[in-house]
Amino acid sequence: MVIKSVLKTLTSAVGVSGDEFSASEKAAQILREYADDVSIDAFGNVTGYVKSGRQNAKTLLLDAHIDQVGLIVTFIDEKGFVGVGKCGSPDLRTLLAQSVVIHGKKDVLGVVSTLPPHVSKDKSAPEIGDIFIDVGLSKEKAEEIISQGDRVTVNSDFRELSETQISAPAVDDRSGVCAVLLALEMLKGKKLAYDIAVCFSCREETGESGAKMSGFRLKPDEALVVDVSFGKTPDSTAKDTAEIGSGVMIGFSASLDKGMSNKLCKLAESAEIPYTREIMPSSTGTNADALGVSGKGVKCCTLSLPIKYMHTAVETVDMRDIEAAARLICEYAKEC
């Protein structure tokens, strides 16, 4: 698998929380190369299976969420300006004067309106109710192609910053999806210690409801949740971040299974896979929180990819970290 190519395909698909089907279709198409019984449910969750051939094998769920943060159209005012609300928690500080796409009856380009600094006294980040999109149309013309409930994304591109680092929208969490797909490719022909269930879950950014549904239906015994975490930047604190390119982040938290966390660290050390520990005292803010208390209870651990500029249109990841996560999944899932 060419990680860069797969990641470009995944991040080019639009899939704002609650309307993930375009992204789900892209992911399902790739997953069919590695898994059986691939399907997309009524909500947009993508699932598939890789059987071990072992009798009474436990089920290991590999989860990564397919949705991305964005905006949703709430109204169109009398001048044709489009008001929006949040789907998830996009970084509002980055939205002023951005080029955006409203995904209506057809895609509509717009720009987020803002007062020039010469006449604006307010230097603070905007509130969501203060954000309007200018599409250059009258109210009547706008309403012909734009409806309340249409999703909105920032108009951004896939960029290669260096040989290993890329910047794109929806790296959170299409990079996690990419890591799971790469792991499945690595596991081809290997003897498995588990039956594997795969879920590319919807609606993580708005409350982890996709994982709740899938955990109830798939009934896994254990789960590895692949998501993103905070990459180090000049204005960040060392204890809350990891250098991108430093490997996979293995989670430790009250909501995670410590035995799994410790085992993953030992496997990483044995296989010389670069990793750091990620300490999340109470909960993780990922699908692991929902999966852990699903059904009869599921042992969970998180594998996180450090990214920079989370919840913006220029999220940045290092492909070496995606590979490290995939290798560690492979070490955990295969028969020793």
Image: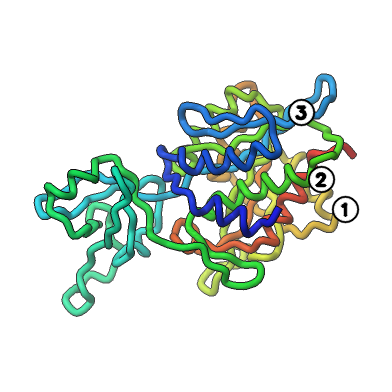
> Looking at numbered disc 3 in the image, what kind of residue is underneath it?
Lys
Residue 95, visible in the rendered structure: yes
Sequence-wise, the earlier of marks 3 and 1 is 3
> Looking at numbered disc 1 in the image, what kind of residue is underneath it?
Ser
The residue drawn where x is 61% and y is 67% is 165
Q: Are marks 1 and 2 in contact (CB under 8 Å)?
A: yes
Q: Residues within 10 Å of mark 1 (few under 14, many from 20)?
A: few
Sequence-wise, the earlier of marks 2 and 3 is 3
Question: Is residue 179 depicted above or below 289 in this figure?
Answer: below
Question: Is residue 163 depicted above or below 137 in this figure?
Answer: below
Give the label on residue 331, or none. Answer: 2
Question: Is residue 153 depicted above or below 18 in this figure?
Answer: below
The residue drawn where x is 61% and y is 46% is 177
Residue 119 position, x and y percent, is: 16, 76
Q: Are marks 3 and 1 in contact (CB under 8 Å)?
A: no
Give the residue at mark 3: 51
Q: Secondary structure at mark 3?
A: loop
